[in-house]
Image (cartoon, rainbow, N blue to C red):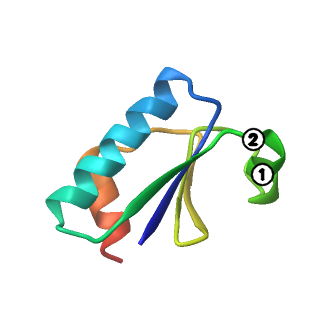
Amino acid sequence: MLLQILGTGCPKCQKLEENARQAASELNLDFHIEKVKDLQQIMAFGVMITPALVVDSVVKVAGKVPGVEDIKKILTK
């Protein structure tokens, strides 16, 4: 599973990465996290507000930092 964190590296982006990593680990998923900081790449996903979480090329959350439990629900859908 590829988890991409879209954002420029702000504190909210860092928190989203932490939460995503913790959620995936707690679910024992085989995952890789990639940070996407390039604005052109972020806009290519259609994301205009960061941070955003992309799961296997599908934007799941943009503009907010969901908690660990919320991310677990996203990852198990």
Whether 72 is drawn above or below 30: the answer is above
Total residue callouts:
2
Judged left or right of residue 3, residue 38 is: right
Residue drawn at the location 35% of the way across and 66% of the way down: 31
Binning the other alpha carbons within 10 Å of mark 1 as few (below 14), some (14 to 19) or many (20 upward) gives few
In the orientation shown, which residue stands out farthest toward the top? 11
> Is label 2 in a helix, a strand or a loop?
loop
Asked whether the beta carbons under mark 1 and mark 2 sit within 8 Å of each other, the answer is: yes
Image location (x, y in percent) of residue 30: 29, 71
Whether 22 is drawn above or below 50: the answer is below
Binning the other alpha carbons within 10 Å of mark 2 as few (below 14), some (14 to 19) or many (20 upward) gives few
Label 1 vs label 2: CA separation?
Answer: 5 Å
> Is label 1 in a helix, a strand or a loop?
helix
Residue drawn at the location 53% of the way across and 72% of the way down: 56
Image location (x, y in percent) of residue 67: 31, 43
Dot 2 amino acid type: Asp
Which is nearer the eye, 30 or 47? 30
What number is the disc on residue 65?
Answer: none
Image location (x, y in percent) of residue 57: 61, 70
Tell me the quadrant of the picture where the N terminus can be found.
bottom left
Image location (x, y in percent) of residue 34: 52, 52
Q: Which residue is mark 1?
A: 41
Residue drawn at the location 39% of the way across and 44% of the way down: 66
Residue drawn at the location 76% of the way across and 43% of the way down: 48
Dot 1 amino acid type: Gln
Toward which corner of the image does residue 74 lie, by quadrant?
Answer: bottom left
Which is nearer the eye, 34 or 27? 34
In the orientation shown, which residue stands out farthest toward the bottom? 77
Which is nearer the eye, 74 or 7? 7
Q: Which residue is mark 2?
A: 38
Judged left or right of residue 72, residue 32 is: right
